[in-house]
Image (cartoon, rainbow, N blue to C red):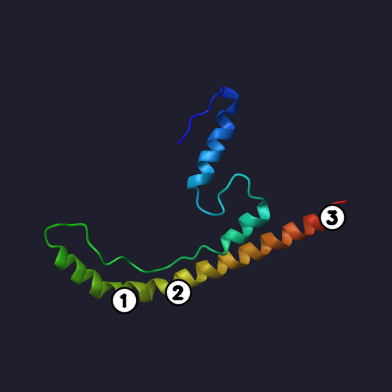
Amino acid sequence: MSSPDKREDLTAWLDSEFEQVAPPGSSSTDDVASLVESLLSWQFIPDIPKSSTRTRGAWAARLIKKVLAPLTTWQLRHLTDQMNAYSAVQAEVLRTILRRIQETKP
């Protein structure tokens, strides 16, 4: 990691450092259309991790999670399906708005 040479270059340096570690779609140089498209890559998943960070009784925690995970996933599936559908519709609305804005530009 390098450091900026001049104070004026600080913003550009911070932007370049951010670009290296930022997840896709969060770039400050991305246009709005690519950000809208990145919405579709995000999905809500109702899966619960079954591992345990506890040292004592970790086997019991894993067993309980293994038994409860299918039940909680079953309950949450309906909600996450609705959230994913809403996100897809939201992205489509934003696509339509962007397309109409681009059509009206001279």
Is label 1 in a helix, a strand or a loop? helix
Q: Earlier in the sequence, mark 2 or mark 1?
A: 1
Q: Position of residue 106 (x, y in %)?
A: 88, 51
Which numbered marker is on residue 70?
1
Query: Residue 28 appears in which quarter of the rendering?
Result: top right
- The residue under label 3 is which amino acid type? Thr
Which residue carries the number 2 mark? Answer: 78
Q: Earlier in the sequence, mark 3 or mark 2?
A: 2
Residue 100 vs 85, above or below: the answer is: above
Q: Quick check: 71 left or right of 18? A: left
- The residue under label 1 is which amino acid type? Pro
Q: Position of residue 14 (x, y in %)?
A: 53, 35
Which numbered marker is on residue 49?
none
Residue plotted at (31% across, 76% down):
70
* 10 Å crowding of disc 3: few (<14), some (14-19), many (20+): few
Residue plotted at (36% across, 73% down):
73
Is label 2 in a helix, a strand or a loop? helix
Q: Quick check: 22 left or right of 29? A: left
Look at discs 3 and 2 and give the one toward the viewer: 3
Q: Quick check: 100 left or right of 70? A: right
Which numbered marker is on residue 104?
3
